[in-house]
Image: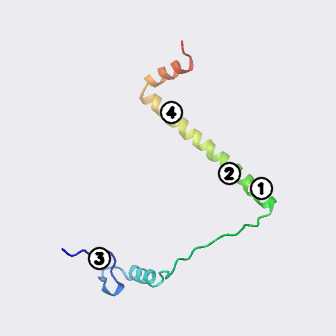
Amino acid sequence: MDAMPLSVPVEERPDDLPRAFARSAAREDTHAPAHDSSVLVAGVDIPFTRLATFFLKTALAAVPALFLFGVIIFGMCELLTTMFPTLLKLKILIYMPS
C-alpha cells in the first residue's frame, strides 16, 4: 500500500479553498527559509533607572491580579463548603485539634 504524502505542492492542491486561504498558503510555501537563521544576543544595554521602573510597574500591576486570584479562590472554597458541609467540620477540626 502506498503511503500518502503529507505535503502537497501548491500546483497539485484541490481548488476547494477560498481564494484568500489559497493565496495565504501559496505565500507561506514560497517564503520558507532555505537555511537555519539563528540569532545570538551578545548583550543588552538598559539603564538602571528604566529597568527599576519596569520592575516596579510590574510589581504594582501584580497586586490587583493577586487580589482577584484570592477572591476567586475564596469563592471556590465557599462553593465547596456549601456543596459539602462535612468540609466545614473538617476545617474546624484542623484549626482546633482536641
For mark 1, what is the residue? 52
Mark 3 or 4, nearer chain start: 3
Mark 2 or 1, nearer chain start: 1
* Helix, strand or loop status at disc 2: helix
Please identify, in this view, whether the residue under mark 2 or under mark 3 is nearer the observer.
Answer: 3
Q: Name the mark on residue 61.
A: 2
Mark 3 or 1, nearer chain start: 3
x, y percent for residue 88: 48, 23
* Helix, strand or loop status at disc 1: helix
Quadrant, the C terminus: top right
Q: In the image, what residue type sits under mark 2?
A: Ala
In the rendered view, tell whether residue 44 sits above or below residue 21. above
Quadrant, the N terminus: bottom left
Graded by Cα atoms within 10 Å as few (under 14), some (14 to 19) or many (20 or more), the crowding at tag 4 reads few
* Helix, strand or loop status at disc 3: loop
Residue in view at x 43 percent, y 82 percent = 29
Residue in view at x 68 percent, y 51 percent = 61
Q: In the image, what residue type sits under mark 1?
A: Ala
Question: With 65 as the anchor, is 36 left or right in this view?
Answer: left
Spatial CA span between label 3 and label 1: 54 Å
Q: In the image, what residue type sits under mark 4?
A: Cys
For mark 3, what is the residue? 5
**Of residues 68 and 45, the one drawn nearer to the viewer in this rendering:** 45
Spatial CA span between label 3 and label 4: 52 Å
x, y percent for residue 16: 30, 80
Q: Name the mark on residue 77.
A: 4
Asked if marks 3 and 4 touch (Cβ < 8 Å), the reply is no
Graded by Cα atoms within 10 Å as few (under 14), some (14 to 19) or many (20 or more), the crowding at tag 1 reads few
Mark 2 or 4, nearer chain start: 2
Asked if marks 2 and 3 touch (Cβ < 8 Å), the reply is no
Asked if marks 2 and 1 touch (Cβ < 8 Å), the reply is no
**Of residues 60 and 83, the one drawn nearer to the viewer in this rendering:** 60
